Image (tube, rainbow, N blue to C red):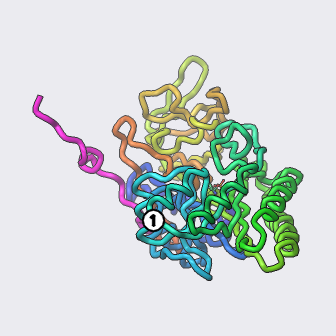
Amino acid sequence: MSDHFIPESVFQRGAESFGTPFWLYDRETIEARVREVKVFDVVRYAQKACSNLSILSLMRKLGVVVDAVSAGEIVRALRAGYQGGVGKQTSQIVYTADIFDADALALVKEHHLAVNIGSPDMIQQLADYGVRTELMLRVNPGFGHGHSRKTNTGGDLSKHGVWHEQIKDCIKLAQKNGMWITGLHMHIGSGSDFGHLAQVCDAMFDAARLLGGHLKTISAGGGLPVSYHENEKNDRIDINAYYKLWDNTRKRIEQSVGHSVSLEVEPGRYLIAESGFLVSEIRAVKKQGTNTFYLVNAGFTDLVRPSFYGSYHEISVIAKDHRPLSERQQVIVGGPLCESGDVFTQEEGGFVVSRELPVAQVGDLLVLHDVGAYGSAMSSNYNSRLLAAEILYSKGSLEVIRERQSFEQIMQNDRIVDL
Ligand SMILES: *Cc1c(COP(=O)(O)O)cnc(C)c1O
């Protein structure tokens, strides 16, 4: 939940100026989150959470470097003003993935990017392509965290990272090809489970000893959680306690390797989730048996998290005619898609549930909260729906940072062939 209050009139102004649905990001919230996380030496934004060029450019101005998990994300980072190059200073762009495709290899070579290796094969592929660069190793310590199979990032069922028993082989393979592994990375997502995090830190210490003198950087990865439920808003993660655990680990590692080591953190969600809103309009209010449905003009093509993970997002309603919304009722909120899973109020496993919301009318705005991360970034053109506009709320004004897509744009690469 954002702690920066945004008046209803701002959402109404947005709807009148740009039409619905649209994404709204609050600059103040982003800046507040960045300030908190800056206790770490280096904050590397995992741009896959939200890679709009203005958001990246804002991050850059705030002194945040960036992570790229694909060729497209490298191009975005460059376009937003980040520069390639490895050397004494912290690399502004690091390519982190479990594979290379042809585009990514070419961009890594052209812009001399640092690479965070997720599979041993990547080292040989870099060498064969004539690249000599600095490497980080994304280590799978042999265990993961979290109940959702789709979000687990460690253990022997995870596709991510280099298995901890293969670190030595990777070091040898890199050296054989004239490259050094200078960084270690673990993205396990312990969240606020500090007992588990201590285990990750120990695994990092063990891995660091294998690298010894060449180690320059350790990265704690991302996975800092945010509270999506309104009744959880007071249990924010304690960033300072989180940092302390890692900082202690860093100090142990420094003692063991005999020189200073930089400590990075790589959040996506934490920096952007709470700044974002999806503003839609209620287009139908109907009864199906005893259930009441609000159908809005945004669907899982805009925000897929509820359909994909059963994620909860707070919902608010803004009356178009400013009438007071005192009465409440249980409703199910769905979108416009020809797909029964197109429901925002559902739990993991696809179980549709109702939510207590104000009694609303067609034309009222329905706002989904905390959608800045993995919201717009996971949107699709399914049902030939257009990607919605993105708006930044900054110093009292609303700036378009991505135009709404046009019909022309979604068909521009289609070709009608003579048959
Ligand atoms: C997705 C990802 C992150 C960010 O995860 P959050 O949960 O959004 O903080 C960080 N690092 C890597 C390598 C990732 O793939």
- Residue at the outermost front position: 176
In this view, 385 is above or below 95: above
x, y (%) of residue 231?
Answer: 77, 48
The foreground one among 408 and 279 is: 408
The foreground one among 286 and 153 is: 153
Q: What residue is shown at x 16% (from left), y 37% (from top)?
A: 416
Q: What residue is shown at x 55% (from left), y 49% (from top)?
A: 367
Quarter holding the C terminus is: top left
x, y (%) of residue 85?
Answer: 51, 76
Give the quarter of the image for residue 110. Answer: bottom left
- Residue at the outermost top position: 289
Q: What SS does tag 1 mark?
A: loop
Give the quarter of the image for residue 92. Answer: bottom right
- Residue at the outermost left position: 418
Looking at mark 1, is its residue's CB closer than 8 Å to ligand 1?
no
417 with respect to 379 (left or right): left
Residue 314 visible? The answer is yes
Task: Give the magenta-colored segment's residue range.
Answer: 398-419
Quarter holding the N terminus is: bottom right
217 with respect to 383 (left or right): right
Residue 14 visible? The answer is no
Q: What residue sits right under mark 1 in the picture?
A: 130
